[in-house]
Image (cartoon, rainbow, N blue to C red):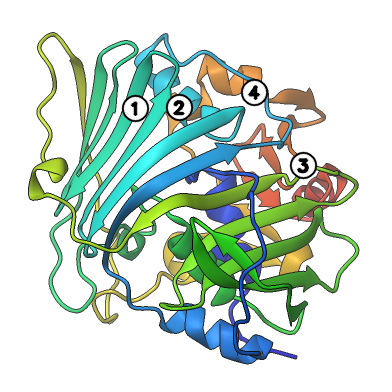
Amino acid sequence: MIRRRSRWLAAAVVPLAVGAGALTWTVQASAAQDLPAKSAEEVLSMALGSDVKTFSGALEQSSELGLPELPDTGPAADVGVATALDLFTGTHTARVFVDGPDKARLQVMDRLAERDVIRQGRSVWFYSSRDNTAAHLSLPERTGPGAGSPEEFGQPDAVQTPDQLARRLLSAVDSSTQVTVGPETEVADRAAYELVLDPRSSATLVDSVTIAVDAQTGMPLSVQVQARNQQKPAFTLAFTELQLQTPSAELFTFTPPPGASVQERTLQAPAREGKAPGAVPSQQDSGYTVAGEGWDAVVALPAGSVPADVAGSELLRQATYAVPNGRAMTTALVSVLLTNDGRVFAGSVPLERLQAAAEAR
């Protein structure tokens, strides 16, 4: 049994529930050839110790979360909501380019259109060719170890890759999870070990998580989440191609095309008096609280955590449905409750648990 102090929910469900733009894919895996036998602890150590910093490749996804498909045009406040939700519906293919911690590009290929996320240093661009719209996000300037990473400011990565998502999940493994080694596999033409995470609780919507770990570098190549009572994987993020060379520098620069509608946003760094640069925000820093432990825990965010333009978005209203004292969004893996007084409750649990948590506060 592997024990770790971090909670799975705070590391994985919160980014998923409030807008991490991860891609997902049903892995087409085949058997690998005669890998040396390793224990779960050894494979876990490989994954957490992987040090691949530069690469490029292709991602492919197919989500079975049960979210509605929504248009990504309309008022400015609605566009970001639709884009975030759309990445959790249907099928998407993409290319990804990464050069260290502060240069990354994701190109999501839609039918007759393309969406791009480009980060270089403190500058992050989001662009959609479908309606020629762009948003520019400026990250706060920080100094010290780990400065400049989106996680430093309590935000998900601008570009999510299988290794980032897998690290978030694996670093939070604790006694609520049974960890075993599955069959040898092959992802993106690379031999890999499989780690299987099985929640010990029957109260969670998550049935299991399977992570393919590259046998050569330890880099996670895919993450697949299975929901209870559902045959197809609900959420998977995977490489279909992977090259471990440094991408061209020109890929990380972006200029909006002529006539593009551009929004400018600045992300403010939260005050962390007495904390070292790069420290992970605590519950007290970010305002959220966690009820329970492990896979069936519930995260509560205080009133005002969701920006007013997002909370009042017509597309968010379409994605949710009315319940007593609020609105809810339920998927195969995550439930979210937005109360009338502005609080947010989320977890990999049935909606009834969130409603009980809201009534208890």
Q: Position of residue 120 (x, y in %)?
A: 15, 50
Foreground label between 2 and 4? 2
Q: Position of residue 13 (x, y in %)?
A: 62, 56
Foreground label between 2 and 1? 1
Q: Which residue position holds label 3? A: 332
Q: Which mark sits nearer the N-terminus, 2 or 1?
A: 2
Q: CA distance from mark 3 to mark 2?
A: 19 Å
Q: Which residue position holds label 4? A: 319
* Above-or-below relation of 33 to 37: above
Q: Which residue position holds label 2? A: 83
Q: CA distance from mark 1 to mark 4?
A: 21 Å
Q: Which mark sits nearer the N-terminus, 1 or 4?
A: 1
In the foreground, 331 or 255: 255
Quadrant of residue 245 in the image?
Answer: bottom left
Pointer 3 with pointer 2, Cβ within 8 A: no
Q: Which mark is residue 115?
A: 1
Q: Is residue 344 left or right of residue 47?
A: right
Q: Which kind of residue does numbered mark 4 sit on?
A: Ala
In the foreground, 147 or 125: 125
Q: Which kind of residue does numbered mark 3 sit on?
A: Ala
Helix, strand or loop at disc 3? loop
